Image: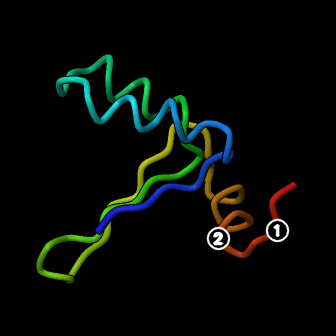
């Protein structure tokens, strides 16, 4: 399972990345679109978080719904 926190208007740009081959450029493009991405490990014992814009305090605020 995976999910993203991002501006609603950016969804089309993110969907376009799914049709591109995996590359450093594609990953950079995804990270430039999303505020936060997550992926639950297949065996349900871990979680990966992805972001290039959030520090710890920003992440706490985002997850608590206190986005400024």
- Mark seen at residue 49: none
Quarter the N terminus occupies = bottom left
Q: Could you tell me residue 14's position as x and y percent?
A: 46, 36
Label 2 to label 1: alpha-carbon separation: 8 Å
Q: Which residue is mark 2?
A: 63
For the point 18% across and 27% down, which residue is it? 22
Taking 37 as reference, is 34 left or right? right
Whole-percent x, y for residue 62 in the image: 70, 63
18 vs 1: above or below: above
Quarter of the image with the C terminus is: bottom right
Identify the residue at horizontal 68%, vertical 45% (top origin).
Answer: 7
Q: Position of residue 51 (x, y in %)?
A: 49, 44
Q: Quadrant of residue 33?
A: top right
Q: Quadrant of residue 38?
A: bottom left
Question: From the viewer's perspective, is residue 9 above or below residue 43?
Answer: above
| Helix, strand or loop at mark 1 | loop
Q: Secondary structure at mark 2?
A: helix
The answer to whether residue 64 is above or below residue 19 is below
């Amino acid at each position: 399972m995976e999910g993203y926190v991002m501006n609603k208007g950016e969804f089309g740009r993110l969907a376009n990345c799914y049709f591109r081959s995996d590359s450093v450029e594609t990953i950079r493009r995804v990270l430039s679109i999303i505020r936060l991405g997550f992926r639950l490990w297949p065996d349900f014992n871990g979680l990966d978080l992805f972001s290039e814009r959030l520090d710890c305090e920003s992440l706490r605020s985002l997850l608590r719904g206190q986005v400024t």
